[in-house]
C-alpha cells in the first residue's frame, strides 16, 4: 500500500523535473558543480550565457555575495555578447531605489567589467554606492572595489578597507583623481575565471 501511495509523489517529481527548461536544468547543474567541479560549472555557464532565458536566470540570481552559484551569474552577465539585453537592465537595477543594495552594487560592478574597465562612470557609481555606512553588502562591495586596484595604489586601497558600519576615508573627488592615474586599475584578463564568494547566499546577512 505504501509503495502505491508513494508512486504518485515520485511521478509528480519526475514530471516537475521534465517540465524544467534546458536553461533551468543547466543553471541548476552550475549551482551544483560550482563548488566541487568548477571547470564543469564554467563550461556550462559558457553555454548558457548566450541564451536570453539563461541570462534571465542570472539576472534573478546575482548579487555582490556571489548569488547562489558563487559568482557564475555575474560572470555570465559580464561575458555575454547579448549587450542590448544586459546593459540597460543592469543600469536600471543600479539606479533603482527599491532594489537591495547587494544587487545595486553588483550591477554597477558588472557594468564596469562589461566596459572593459574603461567607463569610469561605472566605477564612480560603485564608489557612491559603497561610500556611506550600511550593512554587509557595503563591506563586500568595498573589498571587491579594493581588489580593482593594483597594490601600488596604496592610498586608494587603504581608504576603501573600512568596516561597512563606517564611512570610507576618501572623498569622491579624490577617488576620481586617484583611480584615473595610469596603472592604478588592476586589469583583469578577458580569460579570467570568476572569483567565487566564500560565503554565497548562505552567509549574506548575519
Image (cartoon, grey):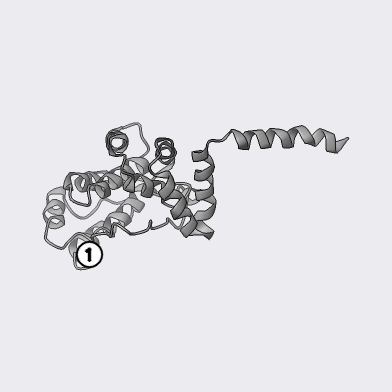
Question: In the image, is 23 to the left or to the right of 139?
Answer: right
Residue 19 image-quadrant placement: top right
Q: Does residue 66 appear in this view?
A: no
Q: With respect to residue 193, does 53 lie above or below?
A: above
Height in image: 151 above or below 22?
below
Residue ID at (40%, 43%): 62
Q: Nearer the viewer, residue 118 or 168?
A: 118
Residue 55 percent across, percent down from the top left: 40, 39
Q: Nearer the viewer, residue 25 or 203?
A: 25
Q: Please count the marks in the image.
A: 1
**Does 45 appear above or below 15?**
below
Task: Estimate how packed mark 1 is, as few (under 14), some (14 to 19) or many (20 or more) residues with alpha carbons within 10 Å.
Answer: some
* Relative image position of residue 27 (x, y in whole percent): 49, 44
- Residue in front for this viewpoint, 3 or 137: 3
Instruction: Find disc 1 in the rendering and name its residue.
Output: 150
In the rendering, at what x and y percent does residue 65 appear? 41, 50
* Residue at image location 49% in from the left, 40% down from the top: 23
Q: Give the SS element for disc 1.
A: loop
Q: Quadrant of the N terminus?
A: top right
Q: Is residue 138 visible?
A: yes
In the picture as drawn, the residue positioned furthest to the bottom comes out as 152
Q: Is residue 167 left or right of residue 40?
A: left
Residue 39 at what x, y percent from top left? 46, 59
Residue furthest out toward the right: 1
Quadrant of the rendered image containing residue 84: top left
Amino acid at each position: 500500500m505504501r509503495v502505491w501511495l508513494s508512486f504518485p509523489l515520485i511521478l509528480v517529481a519526475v514530471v516537475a523535473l521534465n517540465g524544467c527548461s534546458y536553461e533551468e536544468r543547466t543553471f541548476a547543474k552550475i549551482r551544483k558543480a560550482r563548488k566541487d567541479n568548477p571547470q564543469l560549472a564554467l563550461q556550462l555557464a559558457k553555454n548558457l550565457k548566450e541564451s536570453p532565458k539563461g541570462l534571465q536566470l542570472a539576472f534573478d540570481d546575482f548579487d555582490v555575495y556571489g548569488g547562489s552559484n558563487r559568482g557564475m551569474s555575474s560572470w555570465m552577465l559580464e561575458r555575454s555578447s547579448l549587450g542590448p539585453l544586459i546593459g540597460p537592465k543592469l543600469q536600471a537595477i543600479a539606479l533603482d531605489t527599491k532594489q537591495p543594495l547587494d544587487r545595486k552594487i553588483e550591477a554597477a560592478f558588472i557594468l564596469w567589467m562589461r566596459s572593459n574597465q574603461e567607463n569610469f562612470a561605472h566605477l564612480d557609481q560603485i564608489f557612491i554606492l559603497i561610500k556611506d555606512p550600511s550593512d554587509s553588502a557595503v563591506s563586500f562591495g568595498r573589498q571587491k572595489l579594493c581588489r580593482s586596484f593594483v597594490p601600488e595604489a596604496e592610498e586608494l586601497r587603504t581608504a576603501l578597507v573600512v568596516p561597512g558600519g563606517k564611512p570610507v576615508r576618501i572623498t569622491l573627488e579624490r577617488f576620481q583623481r586617484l583611480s584615473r592615474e595610469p596603472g592604478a586599475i588592476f586589469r583583469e584578463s578577458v580569460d579570467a575565471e570568476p572569483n567565487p564568494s566564500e560565503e554565497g547566499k548562505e552567509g549574506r546577512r548575519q
